[in-house]
Amino acid sequence: MKVGFELNMQQTQKLIMTPELRQAIQVLQYNNLELREYINKQMETNPFLEVAEKKKEEGKEEKAKDDDIDWQEVVEKYDDISYKSYSKTSEQKETFESYTSKKMSLKTHLLNQLGLTFSKDWEKEIGEQIIESLDKKGYLISTVEDIAKQLGYSVGKVEEVLKVIQKFDPVGIASRDLKECLKIQLEEKGIIDKKVYMVVDEHIDNLACNRMQDISKDIDEEIPRVQEICDVIRMLEPKPSRGFVLETDNIRYITPDVTIKKVDGEYIILVNDSNVPSLHISSYYKKMLNQVKDKDTNKFLSDKFNASMWLLKSIEQRRQTMYNVTESILKFQREFFDKGTKYLKPLVLKDVSEDIDVHESTVSRATNGKYVQTPRGLFELKYFFSSGVQKGEEGVSSTSIKSTIKDLIDNENRKKPLSDQKIADKLKEKNIKISRRTVAKYRDEIGIPSSSIRRRY
């Protein structure tokens, strides 16, 4: 056996993550708002980056009086590598927020009613403390005793103010539990039937599980009558804060990164970069780079110049990649755009990556967290990527199957709702082979309860 040291040469290929490549990857995964913030930060540290001024309308040009303007640079501006916004925008751009009204927060809504209802200072003080002690659902999380002890008032006074606040809009606000919330709403509607209050007090769990027989035996009523009582209770609001904006809410306004429009039967793709500043290289610092003689200054300017060039190329590359990815999705999912959700086909990242000749990770970064505005609504780009099952020689996506399941349940006989197995059998008749467990999984994902809960008597 030979033992010793040897020196061998081996040629290998590997990807080296240069700073420029990292920046290109980072820029690609940004959505429009994140990209705008990133560009603003880069402009703070890089003097070569400037926002291109918008062109003035014809007939309104003003003669520049600055003698330092390099007109040769203006004429030859297309020699610069620059990034321009492709979307036509006007200075007075109308946004989606221009057509929406701002919702009043729950706290403000209650405080307004508090000021109009109570006149004494101690009542307002207790009321404000109660409103401050509400959780996200609109329930009172502090006890009456704790509020009384904290403010130095009697429990009776706190109870007195609390009962009035519970009748505020929305009715049932500041309730201590679900049962109290429902009973307050029943009282406000003028319902005096004791059997209704009995169901709320003793059979909330049976009501949630649709166990009508158990309720019927206990309250000594026929099942149709029990069902009427349950229908009344189901019409009440278990979360009084629903519909109001809470201070803790993190409200997101979605700006589509890509828009697909249908014009004369053809689909047109527009990359929405109107919110992204139009950048170009500063001619002043570009001249300085050629004239400066100090070694350190020259190195600083050279580094910043190269960084600005890479940023412009990365932004343009991001735009082109998003266009190519959207175009490929449109090609694969053409039937969805023409006919609707049921015609969404199974699609994976590999299909698109092979179609536009890029890596799967590039497609993932280009679609993650980005939205597209289509004639059928606003969707995240990842919405069009879904698994599926076989339907004949072709596949059908899980989203399409969920839509079909929902249609079957919407049209079922409420007295004899379809079980998961029957839904699987009906899908099999449509040449969609799917198991009962998968039907139950898809049904849960779209928020539809089981057949026993859906049953009507």
Image (tube, helix red, strand yellow):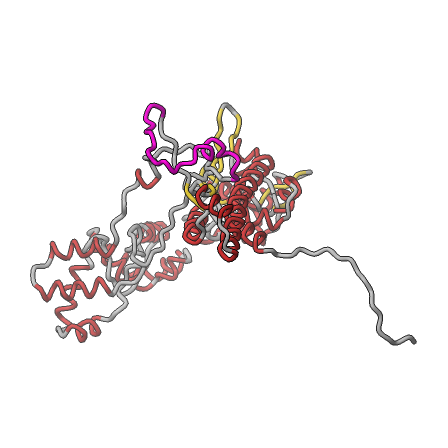
Residue ID at (25%, 50%) = 104
Q: Nearer the viewer, residue 54 or 217?
A: 54
Q: Nearer the viewer, residue 438 or 254?
A: 254
Name the side, left or right, on which 118 lies relative to 450.
left
Name the side, left or right, on which 391 lies relative to 1.
left
Q: Nearer the viewer, residue 455 or 316?
A: 316
Name the side, left or right, on which 167 lies relative to 343.
left
Looking at the image, is 263 positioned above or below residue 357? Answer: above
| Residue at the farthest left position | 120
Query: Magenta part of the protein: which range?
Result: 58-81
For the N terminus, give its image quadrant. Answer: bottom right
Residue ID at (13%, 71%) = 156
Q: Position of residue 326 (x, y in %)?
A: 55, 39
Image label count: 0
Looking at the image, is 103 positioned above or below residue 247? Answer: above
Q: Main secondary structure of the magenta part?
A: loop
Q: Nearer the viewer, residue 84 or 123?
A: 84
Q: Position of residue 219 (x, y in %)?
A: 32, 60
Residue 263 sits inside the magenta stretch: no
Q: Position of residue 57 (x, y in %)?
A: 35, 27
Looking at the image, is 273 positioned above or below residue 211? Answer: above
